[in-house]
Amino acid sequence: MNKICIVVLLIAFSKLSNSQSSLELNAGNKRIAAYVKGFRYIDKSKRWSIYSNNRVAANYETGKPGFFSTNILAYHFRNGIGIGAILMAGNNKLRPATGFQYQKTIRSFYLYFLSTYELNKFTRQENYLTLVYKHKLSKKVKLVFHYENYICFLKWGYDQSFQRIRSGLEIKKTQVGFISETSQTGKTHKTSLINLGFFIKQTF
């Protein structure tokens, strides 16, 4: 299974050559993480795209790194709505899914929503929401606010959720600032993580 995961991820990355990509490093009081992301339209009409999000994180208490990757082949309609085929990899497992997405840019605001459905014996349904706001302070400097929310339902019941906030400055293609991460698990929504720290992100 590990070999299959490696082959799939290499194919995804090969399609992302000359794409818009970024590298982000986080360091908090509970864990450290690195994100490598890439996005590219693969046709001239900009209807088809490939997106890859790869994360490596390690908690200080356990010291064991964890890897997770999400790769999306999407078709975009004119009104911001899209559909996609999704392949997620992590913990030596591949998880194929289908999804519905919506994205919209209004001046300084960007909205992205993705809902995925993994129809297996567990019936996993996941939702991702991203909000980005950028305010221009000068020709080269912008104020950046980035909010992410994730919620997962398993067997048609609540399973876990995660929130991530980044706030800082963008200077040309580099972002620096503060980060806040929280997560909840179980039917009681018990808080399992509160991670506060710093981040730096470089776009290529």
Image (cartoon, grey):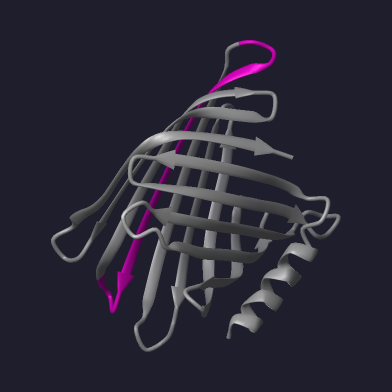
Q: Is residue 143 magenta?
A: yes
Which residue lies at the image location 65% right of the left edge and 36% below the top edge? 202
Q: Say whether residue 170 is left or right of residue 16.
A: left
Task: Please report the bounds of the magenta region as a residue range.
Answer: 138-157
| Residue at the top extreme, as displayed | 138
36, above or below 11, in the image:
above
Which residue lies at the image location 80% right of the left edge and 60% below the top edge? 42
| Residue at the right extreme, as displayed | 44
Residue 131 lies, in percent from the top left, at 47, 40
Q: Nearer the viewer, residue 48 or 118?
A: 118
Q: Say whether residue 35 is left or right of residue 15.
A: left
Q: How many marks?
A: 0
| Residue at the left extreme, as displayed | 188
92, above or below 181, in the image:
below
Q: Nearer the viewer, residue 124 or 93?
A: 93
Residue 193 lies, in percent from the top left, at 27, 50
Q: Quadrant of residue 10?
A: bottom right
Q: Nearer the viewer, residue 26 or 79?
A: 26
